[in-house]
Image: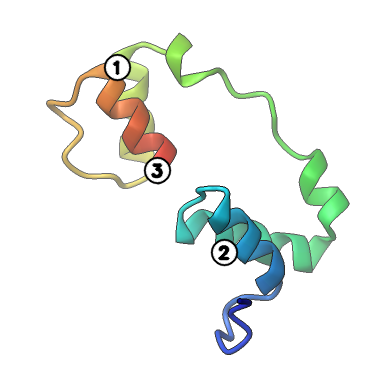
Amino acid sequence: MPHSTTPQLKDPELYDRLRAEGASEEKAARISNAAAREGRGTVGRRGGNADDYEDRTVRELKQRAKELGLSRYSNARKAELIRMLREH
């Protein structure tokens, strides 16, 4: 069911699809609003150059968690860090 009553969502259909695929609320809203603003094709061509989390060091993963404003990552193991980053 689209969230058409939520004024922050500019493309509720895309938001719902992203949430069903497992994206966080924040990520789904960010992508759906960018797609509505710039067009889905433009947003789809962006990015894709990041390293896989598995290929990064624990230090790099912790730095990324810090950049994203996550908490409780300082004592996390690599697998836990990857899960936290993917669920963000």
Label 3 element class: helix
Q: Quadrant of residue 16?
A: bottom right
Label 2 element class: helix
**Residue that numbered label 3 is attached to:** 87
Q: Residue at x 64, y 58 (%)?
A: 17
Q: Residue at x 60, y 24 (%)?
A: 50
> How busy is the neighbourhood of tag 1: few (under 14 within 10 Å), some, or many (20 plus)?
few
Q: Earlier in the sequence, mark 3 or mark 2?
A: 2
Task: Say which amino acid is labelled 3.
Answer: Glu
The answer to whether mark 3 and mark 2 are in CB contact below 8 A is: no
Question: Closer to the camera: disc 1 or disc 2?
Answer: 2
Location of the N terminus by quadrant is bottom right
Tell me if residue 54 comes above or below residue 88 in the rendering.
above
The residues bearing labels 3 and 2 have C-alpha atoms spaced at a distance of 14 Å
Image coords of residue 2 (percent x, y):
63, 77
The residues bearing labels 3 and 1 have C-alpha atoms spaced at a distance of 19 Å
* Left or right: 38 in relation to 87: right
* Left or right: 78 in relation to 42: left
Task: Say which amino acid is labelled 2.
Answer: Ala
Image coords of residue 79 (percent x, y):
30, 20
**Residue that numbered label 1 is attached to:** 59
What colour scheme does the image use?
A: rainbow
Q: Residue at x 20, y 19 (%)?
A: 77
**Residue that numbered label 2 is attached to:** 29
